[in-house]
Every structure is written in structure tokens, then in C-alpha cells.
Image (cartoon, rainbow, N blue to C red):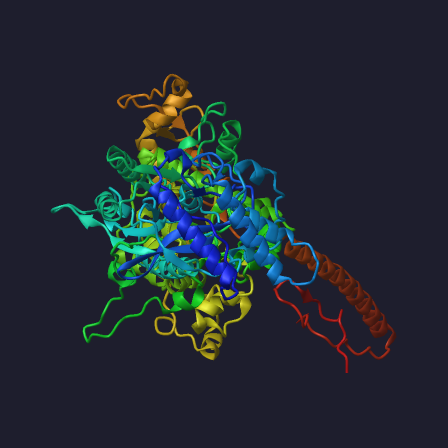
Amino acid sequence: MYGPINLVLTKNYPTEDDELELVLALSLLEMKDQQPSVPSQECQLLQQPGDRHNQSSSVQLSSGSKSQGSSYTQLADVPGTRKNTDSAQTGPWRKESPPQTTKETELLKSIQLDKRKKQTPGTGQPVSRQDTVRADDEMMGEEDLNQSEKPKRSKNRRQRRKGAGQQLLGLPGSPSAPPPVLLWFRRDLRLCDNPALMGSLEVGAPVIPVFIWSPEEEEGPGITVAMGGACKYWLHQALSCFCSSLERIGSHLVFLKANREGNEVGSSLQTLKELVKETGARTVLANALYEPWLKERDDAVVSALQKEGVECRVFHSYCLRDPYSVSTEGVGLRGIGSVSHFMSCCKQNPSSTLGVPLDPPVSLPTPSHWPQGAPLDTLGLARMPRRKDGTTIDWAANIRTSWDFSEEGAHARLDAFLHDGVYRYEKESGRADAPNTSSLSPYLHFGQLSPRWLLWDAKGARCRPPKFQRKLAWRDLAYWQLTLFPDLPWESLRPPYKALRWSSDRSHLKAWQRGKTGYPLVDAAMRQLWLTGWMNNYMRHVVASFLIAYLHLPWQEGYRWFQDTLVDADVAIDAMMWQNGGMCGLDHWNFVMHPTDAAMTCDPYGSYVRKWCPELADIPDELIHKPWKCPASMLRRAGVVFGQTYPERIITDLEGRRNQSLQDVALVRREFGQYVDKRSGCDLVPLPPRLVSEALGLSHMGGAVVKEGKEFLLPVITRMEFKHQLEDPDADAASNPYNAVLKGYVSRKRDETIAFLNERDFTASVMYEGAQRRERLESDYRRMEGLPLLPSPRGRVRRTPTAKDRFSIVPGGAVTSLK
């Protein structure tokens, strides 16, 4: 059985020499089919990962389909890749050619040389190196290929997606073509830096990209809301864009819905088995997913298919570090849950090197027969609700206008951030009124941008803020916690906090969800979430603190709402964040965002609130976050009527609600004293068997794991405010020396400006008091002498014309009015 013949065709119209060369190639293929096949002499065109033939020096002839009833082969470029060091990939790609007789070799050379002479008649110029490579590449062995000079790398990475401009030509396919490869796409909807995609080219066979939708498998065993409404809508749009990207390189994506086995839920395994049977594929490739229930599903798929003789390979690319390879050995368990501890574990126990991002392929070999797929709309990802009159409720209209769902949109947003927002990210990433964040989280979640590509581009930027790169470590930390605690999305990790006395007021929850709490900063963030499916990280902390610390609603309610409305809803990240914010995760938040004072940091001039709460647009800056303090005349001029144009506050006693929250925590910690460390005052958390085995050093003993039964407790990070509250449970928050309420700040630069203005005003005040003292002495002297009094100076306390805050007050008399 022989592979395809490798030919190079230009965009010129075929001449007699082209036709002769084509006829000779087909005759050679016929002669080889009559000879006894030798497995070791199979023809494969596999390019070396380190080489980049961007000059179209190598071409792959692969099978494709152009019409019904006849099979064709498609001529396409083999994509160049960067050197990759992924552990899941096999050895270096190689290029092997079938043996040829002396007559065949000489005849092919003579035809190609004669054709080149005719193309440049009478010039007398030597043939270019590119033409030489194209002519001799057919007969070049592996040794000659390794000795050839590598072409230069392209400077602009974005240009690598464009093809080399060679024409695609259909040729009759060989009946002995290799079986196709099933490329199973999940959350890796990209062409750039996709190890599974490049691994499918390594096989040297036709590639069938497939996407299988199985909502039951995505959800998992508990209440994870892994695919909420906003996430499913993004997935629908991303799949449509990715299908177009595949079509541009000569392929397309086959959509399938998981088949059911009897009364059971849809199974991806059953669908893959049917695909293998229909297409004859002997290889299945995919990129790994790390949710425990999805990893269990993938392990079952690999095991079942391998028993049927199908090779399965899973590649690591979704995180920078495989969460199942992270170990605490050499670091210990102290500080677990913090990103510093996680990074120390990664440094102490390094895995395989990260490697260089892979370039996108120029083309994909296509099969002679495509499996029967389903239209994308039948998956029901973008289904909209209908009213009773039959009209559609298009709740995603604003989401469509706010985002570009394609892979190109991800790279465009990354480039824009690295050229602008990255310079302000380190100090002002919390600003909600300015685009200082990257907004790349949905692209990372759906794999339209790989974390490795993002890290390389961030490191290559002129400004490399460590805070931005540290966010990728937080992402990996969340998946590591999820692998250790599979029930993280619905079960509190700290046992005492399961007994917290939460509120059951559904009206408060509904007001929070709809952005009608009466607190402008919270309402603006929740309205932005509903309309665009996104908000920055600082605003997520603000609304989470308000829900938990002030409304006393359970963190699970906030987690489920975020999962349903965020376009970047990630089970691991949201579960870790809401557990920490709900006081029951591995790492306590050491702060509580105040619903009004936090605006000094994220929205000091009220522009963010004016954008999402336009009914408050005419209220002055200093009162826009506290409209209830406005005088009645100011409210009338602004057109604000509480309860009509803007909602009343659902709670008014913020300090009292905060005190109650602290007392509830102190009560459950005292009630469950066995989960509180007497020496340090820290909470104790039961350890999973995997961490216990690493702590006891059993991981080196043949992978032994401590069996469940005995509970091992570990002191974890606990907020100092809670430790002090345990000593005096009835004390209020104001008297607690470790009060965690964050009052908010704008920036160090603004603090310095305020200090300067205060100092200037103080100096002016002292000068003014001295002048007044001299005026009084002069007035007294004139009265005693009977002289007429001097006229009083004109001027009142005024605000400087360019002032943006309330700190720039200039005393009267210090500034004279110009006439």
C-alpha cells in the first residue's frame, strides 16, 4: 500500500510538460500498485516541526471529495510549525520517499529541468534556489532534507495563516489511501497553537474534524451549570466562525449530537464508535479537558476505543500546567490555596518544558467520503425563548454587538491590549470606566486563544506586567483545586460554614440579578453582565461581596447566576472565586468591597454608572454613587424619582448587615470547634487522599494513595477578622482592628495629587489667616485713631475651574477675580 505522490503545481495554466509530468506520475503509481507492497516503503510526507517551508517547497497530496460518486485527492501545503516540546507528541516528523528506478529518476529530472529552461528562455541566469528545492524535493532523501538550509521565519505571526498561494487540483484518489483520522474538537476551537490539529497532520492521513455536543456529559454529576445560556450562545457563534476557518484551508467541521443508548443519556463514546465504523478511522486525536467528570469520560473513551484497535491520543494545551501533574512535594501544604503556594509547587516539581507556540496549518487533507453530520442549528445552542404571541425574545442582541466570536477577533483584541491597556494594567486594572483589562477570558475558555500563545505574546510585549502574567497562574490554580475537590462547584470546603445562617429572601436575590438594588455601582455591574455577558474582575468582587456580606445570600446562588450569564463562565474559576468570597474556600478574601466607597477605585467620576444606569446621568460626580443623599431639588432637576425611575435601596443599614455577617461566622466557628485550630485560630479543612499521599511521601511508592476512611485536617488561610471575632463574637465590625471592609482608592498618583492640594490649601489658609489678622489690627488702629476703615476684600470660598474632586477648595481672598 502506497501513499500519495508528491507534486508541485503553480498557478500557471498547464503546458505540454505539465501534462507529460502528470501522465508519468500516474503511470508510476500504476506500476507501483502492480508491485508487491512493502510496509516499510510507504510514502509519507511529514514535515519536520523545526522546519518552516513557507516558500511552498513541500506539497502534500491527500484525498478529498469534490463530487458525489467519484473520489479525488487534494493538493495542499503541509503547514510549517514551530519546534514543539509537548510531551504528548511523538518523535520528529520525517519525510520518506518511495524507491525509484534510475530511468524514472532521470526522466523526471529531465522533464523538470527542461520546463525550467523554457520558462526563462535566453536569460542565461541560474535557476533560483526555490525552483531547485521544488525540482529536487521529489527525489530528496531524509539525509538531504536535514542538510538543506532552513527558510527564514516570518516576522509577523498573523501572516502565517495565509496560504502560500498554490492551486488546489483534484486527482483520482488511490484505492489504497490510509484510513482517516478523527480530530475531536471540544474547547479548542482554533488553528493556532493546536497540538491535536498538528498531530493529525503528523499521521499523514485524511483528517475529519468533528464536534460532538453532549450537554449531559458537560454538566457532570452535580449542579455545575457548566453550560449556561450565555456560554452556549458564544459556543454556537464560535463554532460557526471556526467552521469558516476550516473551510478556508480546504476542510470543514462535522457537527454531531451525542447518540443515546436505549433510555440512557447521549454518549460521546457511542457517537465515536459509530463514526469509526462509518469512516474506517483507526486514530482519534483530541486536546485534554481537566474537569474531573470530563476526564473520567475521556479515559473511558480512550479505553473502549483502544480495545477495538483504535489509537487514541490526548494532548495537553488547555492550561499552562497539567493540573494532574502538580505536586506539593518539597513545598508542603502550608499556604495551600494561594497562588504563591501553587507557583512554588510548579517550580519545585517542574514538568515538561512549555515549548514554543505552533503555527496554524495552511491546509488539511480531506477524506474521499465525509460522514453524515447535522446542521449547527439543530444542536440548540442559540435557541431563543418565545412569547405567547410567537415572537422571539432576542436576549443576546447586545452580546452580538459587543464581541467578535472568531479566532481572528481573539488575536485582534490581544494585539489591541498589548499596544494600549497593558501599560495601565498593573496599577489601574480595577477601573471599570476605562478599558484597562484584556477581556480575553471567553476566548481562553473556549480555546480560541491558547494560554501558551497569550503568555508568549505578553512576554514579547514591550511592557510585561507581572500582574497580568500572574492571572494565568490563577487560572491553573483553579483547575488544580477542581481536580483535588471535584465537588467544588456546589459543596463548601470548610465544614463549619455549611451551617451558616443564610437569608432566604428571594426578592433580594431577584433585585441583585436584575441590577435593581438601589446601589448604583452594584446595579451598573449587574446590568453590564446581563447585556454583554461580562464584567471585569474588580466588579465581580464588588457584586459578590454585596451578595454575601450585605444581603446574606448563599454563594451558590451567585455562582449559578454567573455560570448562566457570563460568556466566559468557567466552572473551576467561578467555583474557586465564589467559595473564597463565600468564606468557605481554601483562601479567604482578606477584603470586603463596600458598595459605595469602592467606587473611588473603579469609578471615581461616575462615568461607568452613567453608561449602564442612564437614569442617574445628571447627578453630580460626588453624589452619583449615593443618590439618596441628594437634595430634593437636585433629584428633581436630574429627573430621578426613587421607586419609579430608579429603585429604592433594598437594604439601608449596611453596617448592621455587616456586623450580623461577622457574628454568624463567629457562631458557626464556635459551634464546630473541632474544625478550628486551637493554636493558630485557623480553620481546618479535610484533605483529599491525593494530598495526604503526597504529604506522607507515598506518591513515590508505586503511586500508592491513602484510602478514604480516616480524616486528615489541615489548617488553611483564615481571615484575621474572623480570628479576632471568635474571641468576642458580639463585637461590631467597627471595633474589630482587622476590619476587612475596603474603602476604596483611585491610585497612588491621585493620592499624591490630593495631598498636594491639601498642602497647598493649608498654606493658602495660613496666609489668609495672617492677612485677616493684619486687617483686624489695621481696623482696630483706625478705629482708635478715628480714621476711615478700609474696604473689605471681595472673594468667597470657591472651587477651582478644572477641579475633578472635592479636595481642591481654595480659600476666599487667596484668589482674586479677574475683571
Q: Quadrant of residue 817?
A: bottom right
Residue 491 horizontal/vertical position (percent) = 29, 39
Q: Is residue 365 visible?
A: no
Q: Is residue 472 visible?
A: yes
Q: Quadrant of residue 31?
A: top left
> Closest to the observer: 527 or 17?
17
Q: Looking at this rendering, what residue extends furthest in the bottom direction? A: 819
Q: Looking at this rendering, what residue extends furthest in the top direction? A: 701
Q: Quadrant of the N terminus?
A: top left
Q: Quadrant of the C terminus?
A: bottom right
> Closest to the observer: 774 or 182?
182
Q: Residue at x 43, y 73 (%)?
A: 615
Q: Looking at this rendering, what residue extends furthest in the left direction? A: 262
Q: Looking at this rendering, what residue extends furthest in the front direction? A: 103
> Closest to the observer: 290 or 18?
18
Residue 388 horizontal/vertical position (percent) = 18, 73
Residue 83 horizontal/vertical position (percent) = 54, 41
Q: Eyeballing the image, is 648 above or below 23? A: below
